[in-house]
Amino acid sequence: MACLVTRCPELADPEHGLILCDSGILYGSVCELRCRAGYAAVGQTSTECLEHARWSHDSLLCAGCPLSSLDDYINHCVHRHHRQFIAVLRILR
């Protein structure tokens, strides 16, 4: 009896980000979302290739608005997408 290798579908990089996988698209591989500067993840930031050849999370997204300063980003972008990032961004100042 031959063993079949489980492969999940290819993941396309989202707009304003890229997806990095530790073992490609093979079963057990974990892929993480990296968003470009000025953008933040919306929802999940990683996904895993499961045994039935599907990803644990199909959709990894980056959103935001690229502005010139951290204050602009906090005041105009974070409020619109993820209120929980406000505290983190203020700590990073």
Image: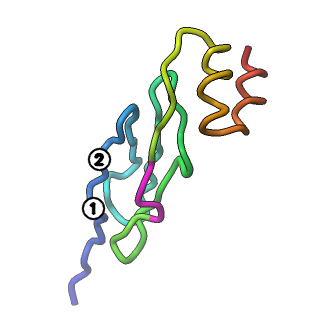
Quadrant location of residue 14? top left
Query: The magenta stretch spans which residues?
Result: 56-60
- Give the crowd class for mark 2: few <14, some 14-19, many >=20 residues within 10 Å: few
- For mark 1, give the secondary structure: loop
Q: Is residue 1 magenta?
A: no
Q: Amino acid at mark 1?
A: Pro
**Rendered image quadrant of residue 25:** bottom left
What label does residue 80 carry, if any?
none
Picture residue at 26% right of the left edge, 55% below the top = 10
Cβ–Cβ under 8 Å for marks 1 and 2:
no
Q: Is residue 72 above or below residue 6?
A: above
Q: What is the quadrant of residue 27 in the picture?
A: bottom left
Q: Measured from the top left, where is residue 45 in percent x and y?
A: 53, 47
Residue annotated with mark 2: 12
Q: Which residue is mark 1?
A: 9
Q: Position of residue 50 (x, y in %)?
A: 42, 70
Q: SS class of the residue under badge 2? A: loop
57 in magenta: yes
